[in-house]
Image (spheres, helix red, strand yellow):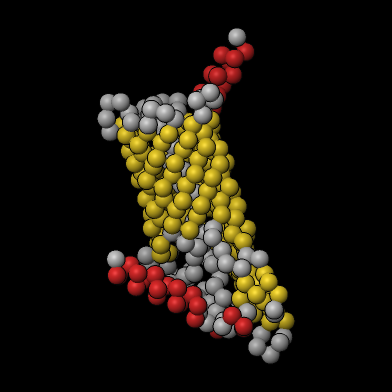
Amino acid sequence: MKTALALLLMAFSFSLFSCYTPRYVYSPSAHNVPVLTQKGDSKLAANYSVNPVDNAVKDSVPVKAKARGYDLQAAYAFTNHWAVQVNYFHRTERNAGDFDAGTRDSVVINYKRNLTEIGVGYFTAMNENKRSLIQIFAGVGFGKSGFTDNGREWNGAIRSHYHNMNVTKLFIQPAITVRSRKNFAASFSSRHTIIYFKNITTDYNPSELNSYKLDSLSYSPRVFCEPSVVNTFGFKKIPGVQFEFQMGFAFLVSRRFVDARVFNISGGLLFDLPKVFALSNHSSKN
């Protein structure tokens, strides 16, 4: 407990006395953890996602920070034990810093990120009633991440910079799910992610890249451990429609440091289309 508290205090102190405004190169996506028990089970979901952020003051004017977007997810069991999933991730973000906040650079940074993933996985029940399930997915993603940096130097000169790159993501995602009899499922997912940053284009000079921890992005991939808790709540009168809520973290485990978002909170609706269509056909016959 004391060790954990010390680590939290160190992280908080670093954020207070950091000599630069972070340039975040990674933001975690929502986990796609479909509840699959047999061939034909499916998932189609849309989640609104946010990261906790702190507003800042730049040139004595408040700047509203943001880190939000959406995650679109699909999964389909093509056998009684094998499934495929496809995901799309999009984020728009903003953070800022000022001399008055104890940072070295006065700047507003706006980000855009998108990534498309595809994966294949194995799932099976852990008991006869299929209330406890285990699955493991592995996949790859391709996308882009970039930001614009608008601010001023120590001498008051206005400046504008950009930093864009292609992102390749490899992941393996084991998960355990426990279902109740009343349209509820709770899952613990532990995703392990390897991120490659390629084709970097920027007008930062070498000194700035070094100051903002961006100079070594292409040297080696970054590895993140990303645990998440995913809960789904069903509607008794609407089979095949559920509400999903999840909260996850992203911890950098690579030796080379980068600034990255640590949290992701998502909520949205998911649909098991065969069950939805079955309900629709049943209603039309009546």
Q: Answer with left or right where residue 178 lies relative to residue 43.
A: left
* Image height of 33 relative to 249, above or below: above
Residue at (59, 14) in percent of width and height: 283
Q: Quadrant of the C terminus?
A: top right
Q: Answer with left or right where residue 76 lies relative to residue 286.
A: left
Q: Position of residue 173 (x, y in %)?
A: 38, 47
Q: Quadrant of the N terminus?
A: bottom left
Asked whether 122 or 228 is in front, the reply is 228
In this view of the protein, can residue 31 be seen by the observer? Answer: yes
Q: Residue furthest bottom?
A: 155
Residue at (37, 65) in percent of width and height: 253
* Image height of 187 relative to 162, above or below: above
Q: Residue furthest left?
A: 127
In this view of the protein, can residue 208 be seen by the observer? Answer: no
Q: Position of residue 118 (x, y in %)?
A: 48, 44
Residue at (51, 33) in percent of width and height: 242
